[in-house]
């Protein structure tokens, strides 16, 4: 079977991206990372792409804080198309996407979020779960729509909140769960 062409978008550390690239390298995920794109010029996710010899690009986001300038979003669509991307994987990409890209890749854009959505969308979701006194939180992979951390849910993984958890310890356990869940979900798209 032909490997599925991925385009990975991220703004930060890139630990989810690394987990995906490691599985591709190990032959346990039948995909090919065709491009990694970041809206942050010095984001570690771009270094990870270079480490794995994946084509990568910095996309200047423009002057909006939470979304891309329309011209830049059009450029992103072109970049993904030029790279023959079939599935767009948001891995810590901290901007909402708008209609042009959503329509270019209908139900082909996924996001991972560190909470059991629909609970706690937005920033630092693990802190929100701790502050709310939850016993369980986790992570969610979902289709992307125009709202923040919103769209049909594909899979969730629970993480127990322990009595002595700090924001850091909880976040670390959620990220372990993310690194398991995301490649599993992407693998299902490879089979489809
Ligand atoms: C991940 O925990 C992901 O769930 C979160 O950003 C982190 C990126 O980490 N995304 C969101 O909060 C989306 N609202 P990474 O760069 O190490 O993969």
Image: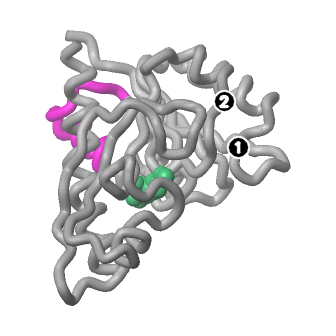
The answer to whether the residues at label 2 and label 1 have Cβ atoms under 8 Å apart is yes
- Residue at the (65%, 54%) spot, across then down: 40
Magenta span contains residue 18: no
Q: Which mark is residue 141?
A: none
Q: Residue furthest bottom?
A: 164
The spot of residue 63 in percent (x, y) is: 84, 49
In front here: 106 or 77? 106
Q: Looking at the image, which residue sits at the far right?
A: 63
Whether residue 30 appears in magenta in the rendering, the answer is: yes
For the residues labelled 2 and 1, the Cα–Cα distance comes to 8 Å
| Neighbours of disc 1 within 10 Å: few (<14), some (14-19), many (20+) | some
Quarter holding the C terminus is top left
Q: Position of residue 49 (x, y in %)?
A: 46, 45
Residue 38 vs 192, above or below: the answer is: below
Q: Residue at x 42, y 23 (%)?
A: 87
Give residue 148's quadrant in the image.
Answer: top right
Quadrant location, the N terminus: top left
Residue 59 vs residue 104, the one in the foreground: 104
Q: Which residues are magenta?
A: 19-32
176 displayed left or right of 8: left
Query: For mark 1, what is the residue?
Result: 67
As rendered, which of 151 and 182 lies closer to the eye?
151
Residue identified by numbered label 2:
98
Position of residue 178 relative to residue 176, above or below, is above
Q: Is residue 106 left or right of residue 172?
A: right
Judged from the image, the quadrant occupied by ligand 1 is bottom left
Q: Residue at 43% x, 70% y: name it.
A: 128
* Element class at badge 2: loop
Percent of width and height locating residue 187? 21, 28
In this rendering, the count of numbered labels is: 2
Q: Quadrant of residue 188?
A: top left
Measured as percent of width and height from the top left, residue 182 is found at 28, 42
């Amino acid at each position: 079977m032909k490997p599925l062409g991925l385009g990975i978008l991220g703004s930060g550390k890139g630990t989810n991206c690394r987990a995906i690239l490691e599985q591709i390298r190990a032959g346990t995920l039948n995909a090919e990372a065709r491009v990694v794109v970041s809206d942050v010029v010095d984001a570690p996710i771009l270094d990870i792409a270079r480490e794995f010899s994946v084509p990568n690009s910095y996309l200047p986001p423009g002057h909006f804080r939470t979304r891309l300038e329309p011209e830049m979003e059009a450029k992103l669509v072109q970049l993904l198309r030029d790279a023959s991307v079939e599935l767009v994987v948001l891995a810590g990409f901290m901007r909402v996407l708008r209609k042009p890209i959503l329509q270019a890749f209908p139900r082909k854009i996924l996001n991972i979020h560190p909470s059991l959505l629909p609970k706690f969308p937005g920033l630092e979701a693990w802190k929100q779960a701790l502050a709310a006194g939850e016993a369980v939180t986790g992570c969610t992979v979902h289709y992307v729509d125009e709202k923040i951390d919103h769209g049909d849910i594909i899979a969730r993984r629970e993480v127990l909140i322990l009595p002595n958890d700090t924001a850091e310890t909880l976040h670390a356990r959620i990220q372990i769960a993310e690194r398991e869940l995301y490649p599993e979900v992407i693998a299902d798209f490879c089979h489809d």
